[in-house]
Image (cartoon, helix red, strand yellow):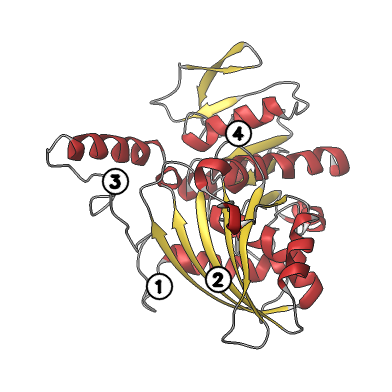
Amino acid sequence: GATGAVGNEMLRVLEERDFPVGELRVLASARSAGNFLEFRDEQILVQELTGESFAGIDIALFSAGGGRSEEFCPIAAAAGAVCIDNSSAWRMDPDVPLVVPEVNPDEIARYAKKGIIANPNCSTIQLVTALKPLHDFATIRRVVVSTYQAVSGSGQKAIDELRIQSGELLNGRSVDCKVYPHQIAFNCLPHIDVFLDNGYTREEMKMVNETRKIMGDGSLKVTATAVRVPVFYGHSESVNIETEKKLTVEQARHLISNAPGCQLVDDPANQVYPMPIEAAGQDLTQVGRIREDETVENGLNLWVVADNLRKGAATNAVQIAEILAGKYL
C-alpha cells in the first residue's frame, strides 16, 4: 500500500524518525507499479506486490486493506519478514499482538507466533493512549466514546470528495457522492463501515473489542458511536469514563501531562483545547476539556484529538518497528 495515503505517510515518518533502513522496497498494485516515490532524496521504484516480494526483508509494513493482508502477511512471514499490519484482518486473532507502544509495548514479544503484529484502528489508538494513565491510576470500569472522524480515514478519494463537494456547493452546484452514501461537505454521517445485526457499525465494534484487548481487560465496558465529519485530517473523540476510585480533574490533568504520547491542551478560559487543525501533522494525542461528570460518583469527560494518518496509523506502525528492530531482531 505504498502509494496510498497511509503508505505515503509511513515513508515520511520513516524518514523523519531516521529509521535504520538498509534497503527500502515499496510495493503496490500492478496499477501503481512503475511509478516512483521519494525517500531520503532518492527516487524509489514502485514494484508490484507478488508472493516473491519479501525475500531478504526484515520488516514489512502493510497498509493495503484487509484482503491483501490476509493473503500476503502469511507469505511475508514465511519468507522471514515480521509484518506490521494496518488493516483489521489480524487485530482480534488471539495469536497476534495488537499494539500501541505507549500502552502495551511488551506485547510485541508475541510476534513470533505468526510473524504478524497488528496496528489498531486509528480511533482506538488515540483513545487508549489517553485512557492508559487514567486506568493505571483509578481503574476504568466503563467508557462511552463518540468519534468525529476526518475523511482522510477513508483514503485519498474521500479527501478529494470533500474538497470537490465543498467547492461545488459554495458555487451553487449539486454534488456527486461516490465515496460516501450521502454528501459529506457541510454534513455529518453517523455511519462508518457497515452496519451489523446489533445496530452498531463495524467501526464502532472495532473500538469496543480492540480497546479491551489492548488494555488487557475483557470486562471493560465500552460503547461507541462513530461519526464521519467534514474535516480533512484529525480524528476527535468525546470520551466519558467511570472509574473504580475517585479521580479528580487535577489528578487527571497531571497524569495526562506526564503520560507518554499525550499532550495536555486544557485551558478553556483562554479558548485552549484540542482541535484537529492543531493536531494534524504531529504525533501526540491531545487531551483537554477534562471535567467531572456530575451525574455519577466517579466520572470524567475528556476531549481527545490526534492525527489519524500519523499516530492513528503510520507513526504507530513505525514505533512498533522501532521497538521490534531495537529489541527483538
> Which x, y percent locates residue 56?
72, 28
Callout 4 touching callout 1 (CB < 8 Å): no
Please indicate whether residue 290 sits to the left or right of residue 231 in the image.
Answer: right
For the residues marked 2 and 3, what is the alpha-carbon distance in whole angstroms?
25 Å
Q: Amino acid at mark 1?
A: Tyr
Amino acid marked by disc 4: Met
Three-letter amino acid code at disc 3? Val
Mark 3 falls on what kind of element?
Answer: loop
Q: Nearer the viewer, residue 28 or 290?
A: 290
Residue type at numbered disc 2: Val
Q: Position of residue 163 (x, y in %)?
A: 31, 35
Q: Decide which of tag 2 and tag 3 comes sooner along the chain.
A: 3
- The residue wearing badge 3 is 179
The mark that comes first in sequence, 3 or 1, is 3
Q: Earlier in the sequence, mark 4 or mark 2?
A: 4
Q: Is residue 250 above or below residue 23?
A: below
Q: Position of residue 287 (x, y in %)?
A: 64, 57
* Label 1 close to label 2 by CB (< 8 Å): yes
Real-space Cα separation, disc 4 to disc 2, in angstroms: 26 Å
* Structural distance between the alpha carbons of marks 4 and 1: 31 Å
Residues at marks 3 and 1 touching, judged by CB atoms closer than 8 Å = no
Q: Decide if residue 25 is on the left or right side of residue 259.
A: left
What's the mark number on residue 10?
Answer: 4
Q: SS of the residue at dot 4?
A: helix
- SS for dot 2: helix
Q: Which mark is residue 200?
A: 1
The residue positioned 59% from the left and 58% from the top of the image is 268
Badge 2 is on which residue?
208
Q: Is residue 223 above or below residue 277?
A: below
Seen in the image, is 141 located left or right of residue 136?
left
Quarter of the rendering occupied by the C terminus = top right
Q: Counting other residues with Cα less than 10 Å from the Cα at mark 2, is it few (<14), some (14-19), or many (20 or more)?
A: many
